[in-house]
Image (tube, rainbow, N blue to C red):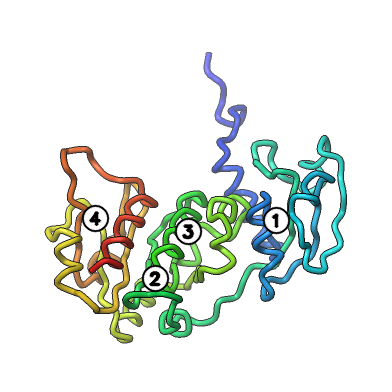
Amino acid sequence: MTDRPGNAKKPTWVIDKERARRAAAAETVWLFGLHAVRDALANPVREKLRLVVTQNAVTRLGDLHGMEPEITDPRIFDKTVGLATESVHQGAALEVKPLKWGSLSEVALREAPGETRPLLVALDRVTDPHNVGAILRSAEVFGARAVIAPSRHSAPETGALAKTASGALERQPYLRVPNLAEALTQLKSMGFILVGLDGTGTESLPDLMGDLSGRAICLVLGAEGPGMRELTMKTCDHVARVPFAADFGSLNVSNAAAVALYAAGRA
């Protein structure tokens, strides 16, 4: 006899998505984990509402930047802030308002520190907050100006995303737009060349980046499995592939983004 779906334990990613919807409705987000909370506290443009910590965590956080902490017992921490028991919060949680990065043109045309060429990342239906968090971290490391995603069918700001981003969420613009295809068309008008990443691509990514040396690039990646939507792929100027040493299939989307960002930054 099998359990009915309603009786099955929900996967953590499903819980994260449900919590993200509730957070979006309330227009606040709980960030958790020492690194994510510490970086958010240090971000002067982040609107901070409530800091809940254990006694051990408040000592490890250091400078609270004027926030008055609520000290709570580790045994009731999850219930105090409404986190899932699977969340690795390290005894620190911060309720915040989502960041406002400005318009598409503002983030796309704003030079990133240490950039070698204008570089953006666009994500089509990448909904896993852990993947998006990892991509934000890579985007910051390799000097991308922003990560762009559609408002719907993408990962919103959540504690899981922020923790995976390891502080990058506070510094790396993550802009969610109403219509991705329209946003990509706008980027073309700003001089960006759209390079889609897909296993069916006929061009090798390193070779293509060499041919486009110095040009403004927007790397476009789709969700694992379905990949980019047809309209998104048609909007791209090029569709490239990451060359593999053997027939291994494909990379995780966050790994593919890291490889593509590295290749684009080196060319």
The disc at residue 30 is: 1
* Residue that appears at 44% across and 66% down: 149
Amino acid at dot 2: Leu
Q: Who comes first in sequence, dot 1 or dot 2?
A: 1
Q: Residues within 10 Å of mark 2 (few under 14, many from 20)?
A: many
For disc 3, the marked residue is 137
Q: Is residue 232 above or below residue 12?
A: below
Q: Is residue 57 visible?
A: yes
Which residue occupies the extreme left position in the image? 202
Q: Who comes first in sequence, dot 3 or dot 4?
A: 3
Q: In this view, does 194 lie above or below 28?
A: below
Which residue occupies the extreme top position in the image? 1
Q: Position of residue 236 (x, y in %)?
A: 24, 70
For disc 2, the marked residue is 180
Cα distance in 3D space between marks 3 and 1: 19 Å
Cα distance in 3D space between marks 3 and 4: 21 Å
* Residue that appears at 59% across and 35% down: 10
Amino acid at dot 3: Arg
Cα distance in 3D space between marks 1 and 4: 34 Å
237 horizontally vs 183: left or right: left
For disc 4, the marked residue is 198
Is the Cβ of the residue at disc 1 closer than 8 Å to that at disc 4?
no
Q: What element carries label 4?
A: loop
Q: Residues within 10 Å of mark 1 (few under 14, many from 20)?
A: many
Is the Cβ of the residue at disc 2 closer than 8 Å to that at disc 4?
no
2 vs 4, front mark: 4
* Residue that appears at 45% across and 76% down: 113
Cα distance in 3D space between marks 1 and 2: 27 Å
